[in-house]
Image (spheres, rainbow, N blue to C red):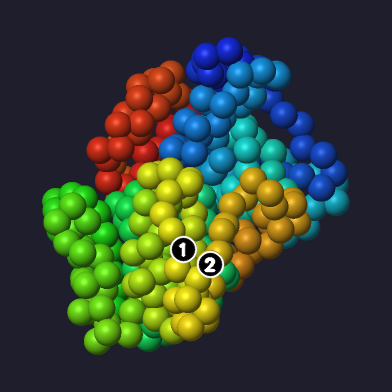
Amino acid sequence: MKAVRVLPSAEGGLLEVQDIPAPTPGPNEVLIRVRASGINYGEIIYMREHRSGNPMTAGVEFAGEVAAVGAQVTGWREGDRVMGHGRSCHAQYVVAAPLALMPIPDGVSWVDAAAFPNVFITAHDALVTNGELKAGESVLINGASGGVGMAAIMIASAMGAKPIMASSRSAEKLERLAAFGVDVGINASKESQVEAVMAATDNRGADIIIDFIGGSVLEDHVQSLAVKGRLVNIARLSGEQYGRLDLRLLWLNRLKLIGVTFRTRTEQERLECIQACARDLLPFFREGKLRLPIDRTFKMDDIADAYAYIAKSQHMGKIVLIAD
């Protein structure tokens, strides 16, 4: 089968499309014929960090049809249309745990299905599981035009958050985000985040902040939170060591500062995140409320162009790889 391989290099991993043997499912695994797979910025980071070791197949989310099931698998059968979360899926076939799979609703394309798992599982884990979102609470999402940020906006809207605030340095992106449920757009290059959040919440502050920027905005985030507010950090695009923490505000407002990642989770924890996302979000997905816009699609042989395009961070929505 064809697969996108990351080859170790002292300067960072190198991409190459290779023919490799198709995987064989174990007794507790499902083999999927991949039709499309989402591309995420995190895969570029993994590629750059792959300086030693063995070649690996790229990709973390996919959509396709069940080709075979292990002897002990129940709940899935050949021909089922599924989407899922799991490594090594930029390929024509991938094996996955049964609990890593979700059914694709009728009428949903391979491309739209492939764009769902990673960003919505990540956003759900941050906003619902860790952020403990309740209907009527206010949410701020910074760096909101990325895939996970847009997923968080849609989840917040579907689950009754109010107001939903989003920050970006691009006025054009903020304007486009309004269509996905943003009530208040904050232009981070021109406005004070703290003032904008307080104005939008009658001086209460945000109940939840989903943070992709990191250290340079830590002070503003702490000042923007309501009493019992939750700051959930997913990424650190501006750096990891900046900003000061006002412990007095942390103490007086009983704030929670939470970090989330899949890197240190056990396999069981990862599967629990997938199942929690399926439980809460699949009904909205079926209704068409949680569909990310597709910015571009690429063929597998053009994976280098796809990575170069996503690295520019000028897209809005998902980049999807079409399996040949």
Which residue position is annotated with label 2?
A: 257
Give the secondary structure at mark 2: strand
Going from N to C along the chain, the mark reached first, 1 or 2, is: 1
Viewer-nearest of labels 1 and 2?
1
Give the secondary structure at mark 1: loop
| Left or right of 62 on screen, residue 246 | left
Which residue position is annotated with label 1?
A: 245
| Left or right of 26 on screen, residue 160 | left
Question: Residue 269, relative to residue 194: is it above or below?
Answer: above
**Percent of width and height locating residue 231:** 47, 67
Q: Quarter holding the N terminus?
A: top right
| 20 and 189: which is toward the camera | 189
Q: Is residue 180 visible?
A: no
Distance of label 1 from label 2 (alpha carbons): 10 Å
| Residue positioned 25% across, 78% down in the render | 198
Question: Residue 38, relative to residue 249: is it above or below?
Answer: above
| 277 and 269: which is toward the camera | 269
